[in-house]
Every structure is written in C-alpha cells, then in structure tokens.
C-alpha cells in the first residue's frame, strides 16, 4: 500500500480499548469519560479488519489502548493475530502496555508469538510514579516487566519526557534498563487532548532531557530501526540501546508507514490530524467489501506531516482527541 506521497504503509496500530486503569496526566484528564461499549468494535470486527489490512500489505501490527490488557479476553484476539505471525503473513505482533496487568498475561503473549513489547515507565521513584499515573503501583509494573522477561519477550521501556517532573529519573531508568537488558525509548510530549494540563510547560526537547546521559556516557548513532519512528543510539560504556522519538524537535514524517485503528472503528492516518474514515459502519453494513473501499480512501487522505509545532504554540489548534482514544 502506498499513500499519496509514495510512502509504503505496512504498519497498523490497533487500539482495542480507550479504557485504562491509570490516569497519566499527559494522556487524559482525571475525570475522563469513555465510549459506550456498543460503540466499540468487537473482537470479530477487529479481526476481520486486521485480516483485510494484512491482505493489502500490512506486515506489522501493534495493539494499544488505553490499556490493551484491561480489555476482557484480550488473549483471544492476540492469539488470532499471532496465528498470522506463525503463518508468515505478519512479520511482527507487538503490544504497548502500562505493565500493571502484564504478569497475568505474559505467558499467553509469548505463546501467541508476541516477541517484543513496549512498557510505559516514567519514573522508578514510587511516589513520583504514583503522581504521574494518578495512583499507579510501581511494584505491579516492575513485576509485570519481570514476568515478560522471564517469558522470553524483549522489552523496550517507554518514558515520556516531562520538564520539571521526571528529568531526575533519566539516569536511574537508563541504568535499570541496561542492567535488565531492556531498550529505552524516550518520547517528547505532544499537544493532544482537551483538558490535559501543562503541555507547553512540561515540554522538553529530548536533546535537553538526555543531557545527564551525554555528560556521563558516550552516544553512537545506530542503523537499528523498528517499525516505529524511534531513532536509536548506543550508550557506552553503559551498554544501553536508546531510542529517541521526537515529534516536536525533529520531525520524522517523511518515512511514516503507519495507520491507526481506534477502538470505535475509525482509521486515523496521522496521530496529529483529525482526518479519518469510519470503518465501523462499513464493516457492519457491507462487510469486508466496505473495508476495502475505505482503505483506499484512507491512503489518499493521509497528510504529508503532522502540525504539532503550531498546535503546541496555539492551543486553539489542538486536537480534542486524547491519546488513549487514538492509541498510544
């Protein structure tokens, strides 16, 4: 599949739920309301849409949320998609999770051909972690990470850079990842979601955020890439592989390969755009033929790049859609 700018689209991110057991303040308001269950795609519909996308050339799928492991019977969908990996029709099935429920699901994920996951972890300080997540338990996340590691799943820790909040955590988390054998991904905060506080005040460019690392260690750029936008560096002599995701300070749209399926059946062509097509009605009324028709429309609508820079400077331009609604 090619979009209007000649970019090959082979990566689909599927949000299986907008619900989450955390309330990270950079993701959603504390009093966030969620979609009625009858507006959500059921597993059969998600599987049918995923199957059609695979037929059209999608080679990698990532399950997101909200918290994907909070959706009931998520292992059923994971197994269905994992069968595509076993059959060679998908190169990779991955997952982004807050890790709090990972201990209960790690073995099932591994059995379903999930070989690597991303786990959100913004601080190793128990009180600061609870503050950022509005009540999350650090111990549960660390236990989940350990369970996934023991199940043979490779882990990248995702850390959102928050100015004045978790800058002091970059060295402890980097050293923890190095000791445990995990990659570390750092992410700049983005201007998404009405009612999410502190976007401008909390933004810090990653080159500034990693200053404690560059003062103590040496960074060497790597050719390593995954399906996502991270650019990777080797941190020595720490022995850490570090991924930098810089939607604000270093645009990465030129080689964007992604589409996003929301939990209510919308395909968003860009995280920073409201342009979308609605597959829920299409699949319920016209089955897979409706999906095929709208997929081609989605590719034509995909914008050349996001506009996060202007949205950060002008709050009137910001999207009302929260991160949990689109998929992290």
Image (cartoon, rainbow, N blue to C red):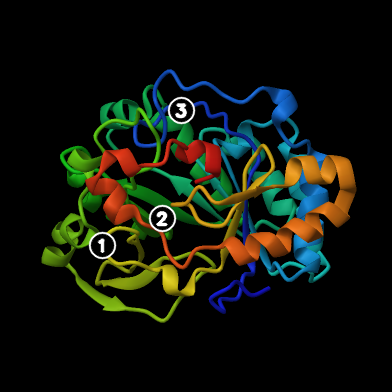
Relative side of 98 to 79, left or right: left
Secondary structure category for the residue under label 2: helix
Mark 1 or mark 2: which comes first in sequence? 2
Q: Is residue 311 above or below residue 254?
A: above
**Disc 1 vs disc 2: which is toward the camera?**
1
Image coordinates for residue 104, horizontal then vertical, percent: 64, 35
Q: Is residue 232 visible?
A: yes
Mark found first going from the N terminus, 3 or 2? 3
Camera-side residue of 276 and 322:
276
Q: Residue 25, position in %: x, y?
A: 35, 31
Look at the numbered disc 1 and give the secondary structure of its residue: loop
Residue 123 appears in the rendering: no
Which residue was labeled with disc 3?
Answer: 22
Q: CA distance from mark 1 to mark 2?
A: 29 Å
Instruction: Residue at 75%, 61% (x, y): give it.
Output: 53
What element does badge 3 sit on? loop
Q: Find the distance from the CA under tag 3 to the CA under tag 2.
A: 24 Å
Q: Quadrant of residue 177?
A: bottom left
User: Which mark, residue 284?
Assistant: none
Q: Are marks 3 and 2 in contact (CB under 8 Å)?
A: no
- Would you say 203 lies left or right of 187 here? left
Q: Which residue is mark 1?
A: 249
* Image quarter of the N terminus: bottom right
Number of marks present in the image shown: 3
Residue that numbered label 2 is attached to: 180
> x and y percent of residue 16 in the render?
66, 40
């Amino acid at each position: 599949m090619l979009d209007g700018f000649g970019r090959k689209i082979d990566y689909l991110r599927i949000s299986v739920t907008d619900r989450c057991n955390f309330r990270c303040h950079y993701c959603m308001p504390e009093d966030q309301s969620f979609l009625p269950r009858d507006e959500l795609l059921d597993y059969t519909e998600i599987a049918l849409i995923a199957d059609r996308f695979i037929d059209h050339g999608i080679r990698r799928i990532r399950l997101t949320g909200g918290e994907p492991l909070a959706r009931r019977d998520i292992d059923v969908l994971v197994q269905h998609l994992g069968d595509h990996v076993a059959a060679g029709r998908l190169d990779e099935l991955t997952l982004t999770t807050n890790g709090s429920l990972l201990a209960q699901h790690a073995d099932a994920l591994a059995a379903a051909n999930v070989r690597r996951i991303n786990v959100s972890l913004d601080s190793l300080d128990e009180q600061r972690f609870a503050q950022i997540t509005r009540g999350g338990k650090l111990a549960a996340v660390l236990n989940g990470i350990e369970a996934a590691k023991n199940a043979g799943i490779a882990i990248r820790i995702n850390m959102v850079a928050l100015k004045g909040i978790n800058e002091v955590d970059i060295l402890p988390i980097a050293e923890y990842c190095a000791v445990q054998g995990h990659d570390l991904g750092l992410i700049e905060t983005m201007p998404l979601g009405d009612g999410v506080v502190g976007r401008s005040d909390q933004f810090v460019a990653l080159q500034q955020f990693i200053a404690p690392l560059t003062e103590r260690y040496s960074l060497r750029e790597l050719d390593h890439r995954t399906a996502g936008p991270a650019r990777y560096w080797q941190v020595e002599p720490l022995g850490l592989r570090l991924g930098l995701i810089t939607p604000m300070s270093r645009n990465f749209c030129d080689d964007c390969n992604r589409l996003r399926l929301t939990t209510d059946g919308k395909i968003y062509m860009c995280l920073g755009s409201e342009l979308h097509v609605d597959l829920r009605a299409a699949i319920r009324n016209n089955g897979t033929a409706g999906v095929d028709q709208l997929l081609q429309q989605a590719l034509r609508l995909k914008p050349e790049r996001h506009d996060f820079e202007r949205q950060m400077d002008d709050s009137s331009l910001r999207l009302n859609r929260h991160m949990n609604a689109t998929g992290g």
